[in-house]
Amino acid sequence: MPAGVPMDEPAAPPRSLRERLTVPVLAFGGILMAVMQTVVVPLLPDLPRLTGASPGTVSWMVTATLLAGAVLTPVLGRAGDMYGKRRVLMAALALMAVGSVLCALSSDIRVLIAARALSGAASAVVPLSISILRDELPPERRGNAVALMSSTVGIGAALGLPLAAVIVQYANWHTMFWVTAALGVIGVTSVWWAVRESPVREPGRFDVPGTLGLAAGLVCLLLGVSQGGQWGWGSPRIVGLFVAAVVVLALWWWQQLRAERPLVDLRLVSKPRVGLSHVAALLTGFAFYANSLVTAQLVQAPEATGYGLGLSIVQTGLVLLPGGFIMLLFSPVSARISAARGPRITLALGALVIAAGYAVRIADSHDLWMIMVGAAVVGTGTTLAYSALPTLILHAVPAGQTASANGVNVLMRTIGQAVSSAAVAAVLVRHTSSVGGVPVPVLDGYLLAFGIAGTVALLACATALCIPGDPGAGGTRRARGARKEVMEGA
C-alpha cells in the first residue's frame, strides 16, 4: 500500500432489531411507571363513594405508592447491581402489573392500598434502565438515551392524567387498572425480548439489616411529611415519627459505614460530585413537583374565585399534556449541552429555567395561555435538570454501582416531591377564602407556592455550580473517558 494513504476504519456491524429496540422498550417502561403513579389521581374525589372509605383512608392509595417506591428504589437498584439489572427490572414491572390486577379485581380499600404499595416497585424502573444503558450502549449513543430515559418521568405523568380522566369519565373505574395491567405485561414481555442481561455485576451478600433500617427510617420520615397536614405538624404522632426517623437513620448510617457490602456506599455518597448531585436532585424534585400540583388545582378552581377557570379533570390533563411533549423534544437538547459543557452546567441551566418558569407564573396566572406557557417553561427546565442528574452519577461512580447510586438519586427526588407536596398543601391551607360556602385557596396562596418553588430552584442551581468540574465535558475529555471505560471493560 502506498505510504500516506489512510486505511478506512471497519464499519460497525449493523444492529439487530432487538438492539435497535432496546432504548424504546426501556423508555416505554419509564413512561409506564410514571403513568402508574398518576392514574389514581382522577379517582381520588370519587373513591370514598366507590369504596365506602373515608377521604383520609383513600389518600393512602397515593401515600402507599410513595412509601413503597421510596423504600424499594434503592433496594432494587442494589439488587440489580448484584443479581442482574434486566432480571430485577422485569420483576419490578411484573409487581406493578400484579398490583394493577388486584386493583382491577377489588373495591376493598385495604386490598387497593396494599396493591398500590406493590405497584410502587415500578419506581425502580428508571434507575435500573439507565444502568442498563450505561452497560450496553456505546458512549456516542449513551447521552441521548439517558436523557430520554430521564424525561420519561415527566412524559408519563403528562400522559397519565388525561388518559385516566377519560377512562374514569367514560368507563368503569376498574377498567383503568386493567389497562395498566395489560401495559405492564407488555412491558415485561418487551424487556424479556429486547433487552440483554448486563454482564456488569458487583457480587456479594445482600445487606438485609441495611435494607430493613433504611425501610424503617424512610417510612417514618415520609409518613410524617405526607401526613403532617392531616394529623397536625405538632401532634405527638408526627413528632414521634420525625424523632424515630432521625434515630433510625442515624443508626442505619452507622451500620452502613461498618458493613462489608453496604446497601448504600456512604463513602461514595460523601464525595462532593455524588453527594451534591443527590442534594440537587432533592431540590429539583421539590421545584418540579410544585408545578403539577399547583397548576392542576388552579385551573380547576371555580370561576367565582376571580382567578379559577373551572376546568374539568379531562381539560386539566390536556393543559398539562404539552409539558410531556416538550420534555420529549428537549431531551436530546439536554444531551448535546451535557456533551459540550458537561452535565453540571446542564443541571444548573435547567434549575435556572425552572425558576424563570415560576417567574412567568407569578407574573400572570389568570390567562390560560400564560399558565400553559409558564408550565411549559418549568417542564423544559425539568427536562434539562432530570436528564443531567443521571449523567452526573454515571461519571462519578464505578460501573458496578450504577443502579444503586441512581436509585439513591431517584430516592432523593422522591423525598423532594414529598416535601413539596406537604409544603404546597400547608401554604394553600393557610391562604383560603369561602366561595359558595366552600373554602378554596386564594390566588396569593398559589403565587406564594410558586415563589417558594422558584427559590428552591435557584438553590438547586447554586448547588449544581458547586459540584466539581465534569469529567467528560469537551471532546478530548470525552474521548479519554470512553477509552478508559473500554480499558476497564477489557
Image: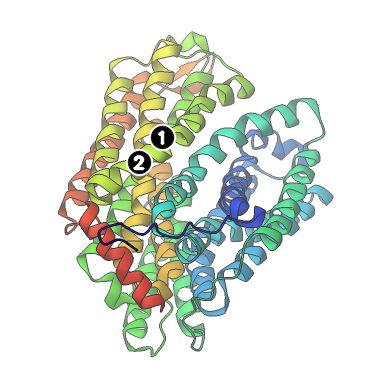
- Quadrant showing the C terminus: bottom left
Instruction: Kindly identify the residue that appears in the image at 33 percent across and 32 percent down.
Output: 449
Which of 296 and 342 lies nearest the eye of the viewer?
342
| Residue 430, visible in the rendered structure | no
Instruction: Say what amino acid the circle numbered 2 marks.
Output: Ser
> In this picture, is 220 found above or below 293?
below
Give the class, few, some or many, for how many residues have Cα within 10 Å of label 2's Cα (few <14, many ≥20). many
Instruction: Kindly identify the residue that appears in the image at 80 percent across and 48 percent down.
Output: 104
Q: How many labels does the image show?
A: 2
Instruction: Kindly identify the residue that appears in the image at 45 percent across and 58 percent down.
Output: 222
Q: In this view, does 311 lie to the left or right of 404?
A: right
Query: Whole-percent x and y of residue 133?
Result: 49, 59
| Residue 333, visible in the rendered structure | yes
Element class at badge 2: helix
Which of 239 and 86 lies nearest the eye of the viewer?
86
Query: Whole-percent x and y of residue 237?
Result: 45, 60
Q: Mark 2 points at which residue?
A: 334
> In this picture, is 102 found above or below 434?
below
Q: In this view, does 170 lie to the left or right of 303?
A: right
Mark 2 vs 1: CB contact within 8 A: yes
Give the class, few, some or many, for how many residues have Cα within 10 Å of label 1's Cα (few <14, many ≥20). many
